[in-house]
Amino acid sequence: MDKETLEALRKISVATVTMQLLKRGIRNVSMAGVKPLNRPVKPVVGPAYTLRYVPLREDKSAPEVLGRPDYPPRLAIEQAPASSVLVIDGRGRGDIAVVGDILVERLKIRGVAAMVSDGGIRDCAEALKSDLPLYAAGPAAPASIGGHSAADIGTPVACGGVAVFPGDIICADGDGVVVVPQALAAEVARDGLEQERYERFAKMKIKEGRKVPGVYPPNAETKAEYEKWVKKGEPKK
């Protein structure tokens, strides 16, 4: 993904992203039950790198399996690219942790942009001290082996009821987490910037006492007024 598109996406809100996707017929993009844990909230934009858990099967979660160098969570922590967002399919189980503070610290040190999961975070207070942006179901004491078996990395996953394909763009802020299909990212960013520019104009008009009909959405008269406002350099009054 080019830097210009990522920078443009960082300038718009998750709410704007969802509207732009809705206009393109993409509706199921907002993760349910995944919330920002940092205070203050740390907005994030970056490509998804995925880790998937499946329901527990004891032979796949034995101590000798967990210690193997090819154990998927270990690979994910060490292979997630810098500036990517590690998206973990925690099966919607907020009562089971998918990572703890040590793994979160390693992600931070490696330059990973954020971690997103519909599972929980173990030793959550300590994990938050790393300052890595964390979006998850919340704190959870049980380790992943309490109910999960690690499946694979770099494959499509489900997170918060949303499909996430590797390379999709994750956008997250105080309103939640949204998945942008990679092929649509550039146009969503472009049109999202224009949407927010018009919304700044519309809010200004509402503050002046104008009624919503004809302003949001705009009628022909308001569109003409908006074009003049843009040509004047977008004055604040």
Image (tube, grey):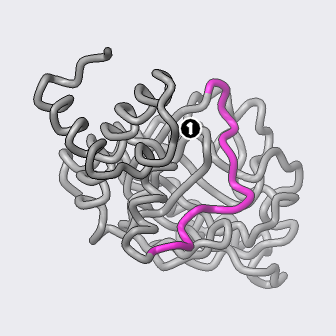
For residue 164, side relative to residue 136 (left or right): left
User: Would you name the residue on which mark 1 appears?
Assistant: 133
From the top left corner, tell me how far across and down residue 199 is, in percent: 39, 39
What kind of secondary structure does the magenta stretch mostly adopt?
loop
| Number of numbered discs | 1
Disc 1 crowd, CA 10 A, few/some/many (<14, 14-19, 20+) = many
Question: In the image, is 50 to the left or to the right of 193?
Answer: right
Q: Quadrant of the C terminus?
A: top left
Q: Is residue 17 magenta?
A: no
Residue at 83% in and 60% down: 96
Q: Residue at x 78, y 81 (%)?
A: 55
Residue at the extreme left of the image, as rendered: 231
Q: Seen from this angle, which residue lies furthest top?
A: 237
Residue 189 seen in this snapshot: yes
Give the image location of residue 203, x and y in percent. Answer: 45, 31
In the depicted view, which residue is nearer to us: 25 or 170?
Answer: 25
**Residue visible at 85% across and 50% down?**
140
Does residue 30 sit above or below 124 in this rendering?
below
Which x, y percent locates residue 73? 60, 63
Work out whether residue 176 or residue 151 is closer to the camera in this orientation and state it.
Answer: 176
Q: Residue at x 51, y 49 (%)?
A: 15
**Residue 79 appears in the figure:** no
Quarter location, residue 165: bottom left
Start and end of the magenta stretch? 26-40
Q: Mark 1 falls on what kind of element?
A: loop
> Quarter holding the N terminus?
bottom left
Q: Position of residue 109 (x, y in %)?
A: 47, 35
Residue kind at label 1, given as amino acid type: Pro
- Residue 34: say if magenta: yes
